[in-house]
Structure formats: structure tokens, C-alpha cells
Image (tube, rainbow, N blue to C red):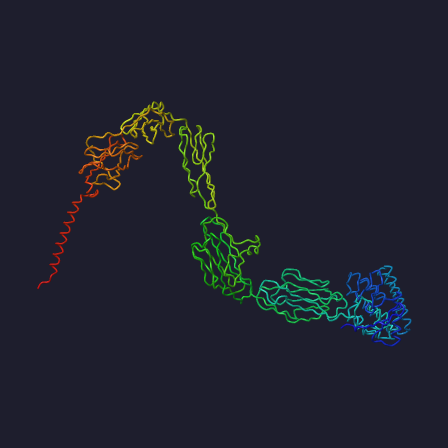
Amino acid sequence: MGIARTHYRAIPKRGNHMMFLDSRSRDRRTAMRWAALITLTACGAIAVPSTAVAAPATTEASAGKSTVGGKATTAGKARADAKAAAGTGGTEADAKARSHGKGDEKDASKTADSKGAAGKSKDTDKSAGSDAAAKTSATDKVASADKNADKGKSADKAKAADKGADVDKSAADQGKSADKTGAAGKHDRTGKDNGTGKDDSAAKDGKGAGLGAADGAADGAAVPGSVAQHAGTQACAESANVDVSAAWADASIPDNTATKLEVTISRIDTCGAATGLGYAITLPAGLVKYSGSPESTCDTVDITATNGTTTLVVADAQLADTVASCVIKFPVGGSSSGQYDFTAASITSVTGLAKAQTTQTLTITTATPRVTAVFVPPSIAANGAATLGISVGRTDQNALAVSNGLGFTMTLPTGVVVGSGSATNDCGGTLTATVGAGAVTLSGGSLSGASADCGIEVPVTSGVPGTHTLSNSSVSNASGVVPQLTSLCAENGTAPNCAPTLTVQKLTQTINFPQPSNWSISKQTVVLNATATSGLAVTYDTNTPSVCTVSGGVVTLVTTGACEIAADQVGNSSYQPASQVTRTFTVSGPVPAPASVVAIAGVSQIRAQWQAPGDLTGVTGYTAIASPGQARCTTESAAVTNCVMGGTAGVTYTVTVITNTALGDSAAAGPSNGATPTAPPVSAAPPETDLLLTTDKGRITTAVPNQDIVVIGTGFMPYSTAKIVIYSTPIELGTAITDGLGNFSKPVKVPANLAVGGHQLVASGIDPSGNPHNMKMAIRVRGSADSLAVTGPPIMALLLLGTTTALLGGTLLLATRRRATPTP
């Protein structure tokens, strides 16, 4: 325990001096002595303890300023005070203070105390002299020490000064027996050192660099609370009752996370600095120091705390003057769920401290299992197959811990669906993963055992090219789990903020570009027909613009030579670009054209004639083209130089002819002279033919006057004229122009005055070879009061058939009834 504190009270000021009286010393003699010391202090002869002065007193020394308000400001002042009060005791304390640096008062105090105690022990038995001699000797020593301090002398000179004062030391020691109440503590004055060589009370107190020495040098002054006793680094006489205790910052944490163990050093008495404090902590089994630096509010401290260890060591902690407490916070955690008690036994190797620990319990709970995912492989072709691997895991090392009722729904990225194949699940519960669905669901899963985890594998596919990513928001309806889809990669040391990603490559495509034929420049233009398997349009470009150019899908031949065309398809959001395909063909010289084109008109036709070109190499035939209109005719041999085509009667035509070769066609020869075809003639009697006409209602057999009929004929010369006539007396009903196939459909009206009876409807023209072509249809014209035309068999025959059928049915019914009548 500390030395008993001496209490002072001030007495009224006399002259320039403030007087103080010891509350325990009331006699006049003591007061006189105390007043004399204060008078000497005012003259600068000796130092006064800071605790005994009502206002700050400043004495300059080479080591710094004196204490202010009870605080020792520098180690140099501690050395000066110790030397002034104790002589030789202060010299060794001074050297110790210099070796430990500013503020290191603890070791210096111990050395000074030891020297002071030793000095006392030697001279105790030499009790002689008077109080005046003791006062004079102490005053002289103080003045000598102060003088050396003011001159900035070194420690060796201070020692020499101390040795010079040894002669007076004996006289000072003789005065100790006069008044033991002047001692600030109850230390042993019999010359015993308890086997340690140190003053007993100074060893207990541990404060003041020169406390023991000062006590030994100035005891003879018999002043209560001796001035010399309080001249060390401590302004107070007590530093005991400093406690250490610890508490958890959090009552409960998940496994593998950190909390703070907050260790507090505290005291009730805040007068003076408490230094050299220390302790060691052994964490409860299963807890370790986590990463991060300890946080400290102590003035100075030396902390040893290695990550992953269970021992925390604090040394040389200090509470500054007036500071009641300081805290050191250590990051601590564990990997297994359970309860962890921190008790007084957890604190060991305390120095200058008393344990005030109560049991503090930290509860570690099982951290919520995490849901992570990955696509394997991470990249596929469109409509390819991948596997979505889902992991549910926890970090709790407690093998007895169980996590039940785990579940979640993971929504797949847009464009990704569950593929064909079987899903697997070792997480227990129920897994729902329907082919073609856009989500996967787990319900009722569970985990058990240390660092338990389980896995789910689901086949997936996508036909949508691009990047498809899962995020924490992809997980919904979470039960007992937490999604960590975006943090797993960062934990594994790869890219930060990464997430499970499936890259779907675009579809591939190819170009089909048929080889163009070689062409004569007479061809002029060539149409290209390349296609892409994607169905997307193919674009073209020419690599030989001097020979041929291209626009859209049409090549224009410029001159003879090799024409090279490149076909491309650049792709889109679904298809990759196709590989380019090129094709080359030869452009040859012009094909010779025919000569002397002549047109000869005929019945519904034009006959074209021409002369063959001089060079027939490669000639495969000719094409004659009539203008106006669309009529044309061809030959299949270079030797055939005429052909027939249809024409509208009364229209004048001209004809051009081109030579046909495998390399292309020649330029057109002509035009010819004009030629005007004539209409087919009307014969007096119906022509003989087996070809039958029809109508839009099929073949008819009867008609009435003024009836509209749509006549249909086939097999005529394309673009020729056909005439429609009704017989017996021929009456023209109209003229038809055939189409490109030689067919026509012509509305006509039955004449109003046409005689009732049988008639022939005839269409006359020419066939594709230019020969006569006739078709007919027999009809019976009835009077206007008769029924309308009837198609198919005669109506009377139908009526007769119906009557016969009815009679036959009645006869059969009567016979049946007779057979059914029972016999009597």
C-alpha cells in the first residue's frame, strides 16, 4: 500500500511569505520550523514540495522547469529535485533518468530510493547534533545541487558535488531522532533494509525518483511531510489500487467474425502518473486474435498481439497525472459456435495492477449459410449446354451444429433456362428444376457437421447470345441462407465484384455462293444468287471494278477479263459474321448478232425470219421478240433461222432477234419491218373438232336467250387472237386474246333472238405451232319462259329415273308387310 498522505493547510501570509501548517502538528515548535523552511524556499535556498504550495512555484534548472500544479514536467526536474533533497541519492537517479529518456520515472525512482535507504542505514547509529546543524547541512546540500543544475553540469559533476556533501550528511542524519513525524511515510529508521537494500516505505510506494534519499538527508529537520520527501517526479504520495479488467464489446457474434476485447486499466486516485503497468491475457480456448491493430487510449504502452495467437501482452502502460483510466481494444474472434468465458484466470503476469475481473461471456452463433453459384463451362455456343452449380455452405467449425429449413429460389438470367437432363441435389429437401423453366427452387434443405456444405447441379441452356450474369438479387424467398453470389470471387482472390456469368456465343453461319457462269460481255448484266444459312441477306462487292461492278445483287459487265465478286454476311445480335466467299468468272467478247430480220404477218401470228451470224461458235439458238407486247419465239439450233409467235389481230408489230450462246446473248438485231396479224376467219359451218370448251360453271348443255356465259378455252398460241361463234347460223359473240400459256376466259351473251333448239358454241384460233386450233360446246337454247340452263344429263331422264325408283320402293314395302302378317 502507499505511504500515508500528509495534509497541509495554509496560514495567513506574513510579509512576502505564505505559511502552511501540518494538520497533525499543532505545537509552536513545529510551526516555527515549517515557517523557517518556507522562508528559505522564498529565498531560493531549498525546494518546497508541490503538494504543499497553494500557488505554482517555478525553479529553473538545467533539466527543465519545476512541477506545476502537482505535475512533474520533465525527467530533468526529477533529477534536480532528487539531488537537491538527497545528495548522493539524486546523482544515481539522474543517471538512470538520462538512460531511460524523458518521462521514464519508474526506474529512476527505484534507484534513488535504494540509494537514499542505503545512506540512511549507514548513519542511523550516529545520532548527534542539533536541528540547526541538520537544517544548515541540508540547506547547503540543496544549494550546492541547485548551483550545479543551473550551470548545466553533467552527471559526473553532480556526483562529485554529492560526495562533497558526505561530511555534512552525518550531522544531518543525527537530527533524524528528534522528530520522526517529519517523515512522509512510516519507513524503517533502524538501519534495517529488509534484506533488499531499499527503504521499506519507498519500495512500497514506488513514486518519486529521490524519495528515499531525500528522506534520509532531511529527516533531521523534523518537518511534517518533509520538503525533501516530496521532491521526486511524483507530486502525490500514493499510486496503489490500479485495477485491470476486461469486457466483450458484443455479447454475441457469428462465427468467423471479430468483436473487441476491451481491457481497461483504472484507478480511483488520479493524483500523479501511474507507470510501468502491464499484464498478459490468455484468450479462452477456441478464440484467437483477429487481424487489425489494437486500439489504445493509454499514454504509452508496449503491445504484443500477433494475428492468430491466443496470448496478448501489454507492458509499460502508463496513466498520466489526473487520468483515471485507459482502454486497449483487441480484435478477437472464433470459428466455432458456442459460449466463451473470460475470467480472472484469463489475466496473468500483472505488473503494478490488481485484477478486478468478473466473468464475461461471449456467445458465438452459427453464421447464416451462404449460397454461391457458378456456371460450368462459363462459355457455350448458342443453344449449347452448361451446368449451373449451386453451393450452400457455412463456416462454423462446431461439428454438432445443425442448420435446418434451408431454402431459396434462384431466378436464372433472362434468356437462360433449365436444360434437358437430370438435376442433382445433396442438400436434402426438395429441388424443383423443370426443363424450360427460368428458375430453380430448393426447400427444406439442411446442413450438419463442421464447415458443412452441399451442392446442387442443374443443366441449363440458352439460345440468346450475350453475357448472362447472376447477382444477389437473383435469389429470393431465402430461408435460413444468405446469397453471396457477388462476393465469392473476391474472397478467392480473383476479380472484385465478380459474379457467376454464362457467356453465350453467337450462332455461326455460312454463305452458299454458287459459281457464276462465264459470260460474254454481250450479256451486259448478271444476277447473283448467294444465300446465308442464317437467312440474312448477303451483300456483294467487286474485287475487279475495271472488269465488272456490282450493285445489290446485280453485276454489270464492263469489259472482258476476270470478274471477282466477294459475298459477305456481317451477322447481327444472334449470328456471328460469316466467312467471306469469293467467286470469279470470265467475261468474254461479244456474241455476234443475226442479220436481216423480217416479220411476216399471218392469222393471229407473226413469222420472224433472219440470217445467221458469220461465226456460229457456241451458238445454241435464237430468240425473236415482238414489239409491242410480250410475244416471242425461240429456236434450239444455230441452223434454224425462223419462228412463229402470236399476235393480236389488227396490231402492227416489229421484231428483233438475238443470238443465244452459253456465254450469253448477243445484242439484238433489227428491228424488222412492221407486220399486222389478221383475225381467224369464220366458216359457214362449225369446224370439226374433238376439243371441248367449258365455262366458269363447268360444261353446260342448255341456255336461254340473253344469258351471260363465261367461255374458257385452252391450247392456243400465246398472245394470239381467238374468235368465239355460235352456230347453226354463225353469229360472232366476241374475240379473246390468249395469255402467255395460250389460254383465255371470255364473257359472252346468248343472242336474244337465237332460235330455240340445239346449237354449237365454237372458239377458233391457232395453236403454238401456228396451225388452226378449234374448240366447241353443244348447247340447247330454250324459250325465255322455260327454265334456266341445266348442266349435266337431260332433266326428263332424271324425272323418269325418280319415278321408277319410287314405284320400285312401294312394291318392296308392300311385299314386306305381307310376309310379316301372321297366319291364322
Residue 558 screen position, x and y as percent? 44, 29
Q: Is residue 455 left or right of residue 593?
A: right
Residue 474 versus residue 198 in the image, above or below: above
Describe residue 728's horizontal placement relative to residue 392 as left or right.
Answer: left
* Frontmost residue, 647 versus 511: 647
Instruction: Relative to 37, say whether 150 is above or below.
Output: above
Q: Quadrant of the C terminus?
A: bottom left
The image quarter containing residue 231 is: bottom right
| Residue that sits furthest to the left in the current view | 824
Q: Is residue 27 above or below residue 706?
A: below
Q: Nearer the viewer, residue 296 or 377?
A: 296
Q: Taking the image as drawn, is residue 623 in sight?
A: no
Q: Quadrant of residue 253?
A: bottom right
- Whether residue 154 is visible here, answered yes or no, is yes
Q: Position of residue 449 (x, y in %)?
A: 52, 65
In the depicted view, which residue is nearer to us: 626 or 214? 626
Q: Is residue 609 left or right of residue 168?
A: left
